[in-house]
Image: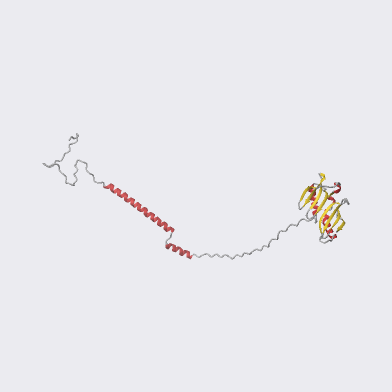
Amino acid sequence: MNTPQGFPTPPFPQGPPGRGPQSTPLGAPASTPSWMPQDQPPNKSGRNTALAVLALVVVIGAAAVVFLFTRDDDEASVDSPSPATQQQVDEVLATVPTPTVTVPPVTVTSAVVDPLPPPTALAPANLFTGTRAAEVIAEIGVARGAAPLRILQALFYPEYAFAQVQDPSIPANVDEYQWRGDLSGPAPVTLTGDGDLEANLFSDTEVNWAVIPTLVETALAQIPIEGAEVSHISVQRNLPFSDAVQIRVFVNGTRTSGYLDADAQGTVINVSQG
């Protein structure tokens, strides 16, 4: 065996004289030579540290579990009071008097409302009364744009009227206006015959229209026939018998009829019956 320089040659133990190398009893480990590294005893301080850490973890986990259970119990105790506490609350509430509210009786009186009368229909205008005839003639004069209004014939019924009047812009023409609550027209009038138109016309200012209601009463009084009533009134010149303007009041009855003539100012000049 060669030994590096500087290192002593390790001594080898010598066996007993006349024997071979010393043997190790069967089953027993052979001893380690002193010149080889020896096994170190285990480090007890590291093991103790690990055990301490494990114990600390166990303690912390147990404390967390206890905290959670305790917290749940506290919340349960807040939400649901103990039976003894609930009983005390019930006893206190039982001693609090219940307020009594008295509502006075209310008497409701039914209001009696008289039924409204049915609407009254407006009576149609009666042109035989008041100044109605004069108003209609004045309205036609405004519509025609003529002053004075030149009239060929005017007819009055209780609820409507007609008037044939000259067109001032075309004197040869005559138009008709109708009044039935409202004025309508003008409508052309066809003239027949060879008479003189101007000789048949008269002005609205020549007639006392306000005497018409009086003439109606006079006609009914002077023509005493059964069921007498005034049907209509005409105002025109009495041609071909006379050129005078004449008011004629027609009276109809159940069996006969008649009429009353008056001049333009309402003076009665003739009464005819049958």
Which residue shows up at 28% across the image and 48% down it? 47
Farthest residue toward the right?
Answer: 241
**Left or right of 62 on screen, residue 112:** right
Tell me where residue 253 sits by quadrant: bottom right
* In the foreground, 208 or 98: 208
Q: Of 247 and 41, which appears nearest the observer?
A: 247
Report the number of numbered marks: 0
| Image colouring | secondary structure
Q: What percent of the width, then of the height, locates residue 71? A: 40, 55
143 w.r.t. 74: above or below:
above
The percent position of residue 115, horizontal first and vertical second, equals 68, 62
Q: Position of residue 94 (x, y in %)?
A: 48, 65
Q: Residue shown at 42%/57% (left/top)?
A: 76
Q: Position of residue 121 (x, y in %)?
A: 73, 57
Q: Please identify the quadrant where the C terminus is shown.
A: bottom right
Residue extending farthest left = 18
189 vs 87, left or right, is right
Q: Residue at x 44, y 62 (%)?
A: 86
Q: Residue at x 40, y 56 (%)?
A: 72
Which of the image's four quarters has the N terminus?
Answer: top left
